[in-house]
Amino acid sequence: MKFLRVNMTEKSIKAEDVPRAYQGLGGRGLTSIFINAEVPPTCDSLGPENKLIFAPGLLSGTTLINTSRISIGAKSPLTGGIKESNAGGTVAAALGRLGITAIIVEGKAPQGELYLLAIDENAQARLLPAQGLKGMRTYALVETLQKDYGEKNGILCIGPAGEYQLASASIQSTDVDGRPCRAAGRGGLGAVMGSKGLKALIVSQGGKHPDALADPEAFKQAAIVFAKAVKDHPFSGQLMPALGTSMLVGPINAAGAFPSFNATQGVLEGWEKVSGEKLAETIKARGGKSGHMGCSQCIIHCSNEFVDTKGKYVTASLEYETIWATGGMTGITDLDAIARMDFLCDDIGIDTMNTGVAIAVAMDAGYKPFGDAQAAVELLEEVAKGTELGRIIGNGPVAVGKHFKHHRVPVAKNQSIAAYDPRGIQGMAVTYATSPMGADHTAGWVVGQNLAAFGGKLDPLSPQGQVEVSRAAQIATAAFDATGLCQFAATAVNDIPAAGQALLTLLSAKLGTALTPEDVTALGVRVIKAEREFNRKAGLTNKDDRLARFFYEEPLPPHNKPVLVSDAEMDRTFDF
Amino acid sequence: MNVSVRLFGLLPCRFPGYDSEKGMEVDLPPGAKVKDLLAQLDISKEEGGIVAVDGLVQKAEAELRDGSVLHVFHPIVGG
């Protein structure tokens, strides 16, 4: 139960008890409420007034499965609003076991200076000069740090993109194999870390002092029930280990909602070449790994290791959203090229989604033809080198659209959409437009409800009922993101009543209060209210709760619908 | 009537000899709906959550036509 406050201006570290106002919060709940309370909303996101907060979830560091999601918060240089970006890997569990509720990075090191923050197994933190690591890409960086500090560390770090303070820069997180292949990709938080002069956080995985549980026995019993439900559910127990997230390529194309060729087509011709089924088959034939474990304490194993034709490691884990952004949007249907781009994005430390879409916008503007994999890889190398064009690509789709004077830029609040076209699944239009995070599929994923054969009357091509499902999903997600649990474990919570009850028991047994489902909803509402309050004070209004204009004006084949959710409907989403 | 069915995810494992390139042909009574096809193939709603008919995702009550091409996917959870 402590905060570590790291001041990069003074090079000081202070441990303090968690202030009362933040007690009982974790993950996104903590980062968003903290940022709203402590960061001046109109500040320069890359200046000393912004704060970068790393918070494991409420259940991270406990024995519960799948609880190693870390939330990272700050004012975003991409959206100009509040940002929570979360990632899996090993650091959240490690911080939880050290009894650290959050690390808060404040101030700013003098320009050109670079530091590491190392936290040992006794939760003692040190700031160490790291000039020698300047410009290093993340794979080489992590290898060096593991050599110097030992392999039993979880690492969060930035690559060249973060040092250049590009608006799509990510914070990379090591997986259980020690590779920096998990990402807090969205919103440019790598640029905030770079602006502070912080290259990496090195966190011992040897902590033995997690916060005490209020009711250890109840926790233990509920944790068993929860794990069993996650294992028993066909999605998390069978489908995800077999195919991973790329299982979505087929159904979303079948729905005509897979934004392709810079969101001018809803079906990618040749999608079978990049489907989850094809990916699993390719990996198996080459001796790579499917059903691979990526994050601490995971029992779902949705990760994979993609290898080349000689069986040599290329990247982990090739995910649906990356296949879409670097493949569907660019018209590239070659898994080897997509895997190469995924690796490069991780290595350079940049969001695969915002960057794939940035390249797609450049192609749509005529800079290079769609499908030109060589050109796409070269553009990523430009980002790494920090050339003028590389910086434009690395600042995201809006920067590219401005540079090439191109109007079709698929964003909301400057952040690229994800792999569900809002014209093909109108509920995603609501989530993209109204999420305080900018276009973010994880903020309120309403795809399943829209496409389900047995899922009521929701029509993906109609605006009817979409505001209600998006609102409910966004509130539930805001609460869930406070727990540190992986969203793929949420399937069991939604579908198996015993798992939902177990989650309430787990949270109650951790916090020592008897929580009800209404309390959880209230937390979600509280978090979204804090985020919207910050955004309002930062200058964002209802007019920012809109998608890029072309989504309303250019119908998407094959269904030929534009976004049909009206502005008034959008504004109803959070009329609380 | 006859419809053409393609299966995805782990569903093909349920049908020995299923050809993933060609899919399979299924005979159904006239007026059959999406839910009838799934029942005939013994695919539960937990297994076969998403069905596209001729390129458009349909609900369980949607009627099929002779010659329809169906894609059957598992229910999905976010990405």
Image: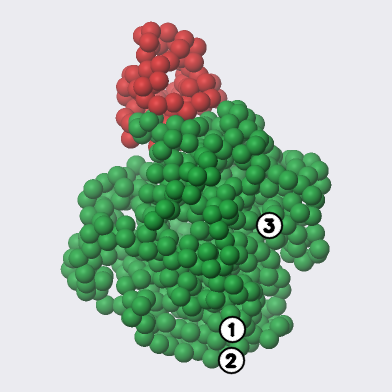
Chain colours: A green, B red
Label ID, residue A10: 2
Same-subunit check for callouts 2 and 1:
yes
Which mark is first along the chain, 1 or 2?
A: 2
Residue A35: where, in percent of width, then height?
Answer: 49, 73
What residue did someone put label 3 on? Answer: A396
Q: Residue at 66%, 82% (x, y): give it.
A: A114
As drawn, which residue projects farthest toward the front?
Answer: A568
Label ID, residue A107: 1
Residue A74: where, in percent of width, then height?
Answer: 54, 70
Which kind of residue does numbered mark 2 sit on? Glu
Asked whether the viewer can see residue A44, the reply is: yes
Label ID, residue A246: none
Check the image and report above or below for A451 versus A67.
above
Which one is in front, A369 or A340?
A: A369
Which kind of residue does numbered mark 1 sit on? Gly
Check the image and report above or below for A562 versus A75.
above
Which one is in front, A254 or A519?
A: A519
Q: Residue at 69%, 53% (x, y): give it.
A: A397
Q: Mark 2 lies on which chain?
A: A
Which mark is first along the chain, 3 or 2?
A: 2
The quadrant holding residue A501 is: bottom left
Secondary element at image label 3 = loop
Asked whether the viewer can see residue A172, the reply is: no
Check the image and report above or below for A373 versus A146.
above
Q: Which chain carries label 3?
A: A
Which mark is first along the chain, 3 or 1?
A: 1
Which quarter of the rendered picture does the C terminus of chain A lie within? bottom left
Q: Mark 1 lies on which chain?
A: A
Near mark 1 (Cα within 10 A), the count class, few <14, some 14-19 or many ≥20, is many
Which quarter of the rendered picture does the N terminus of chain A lie within? bottom left
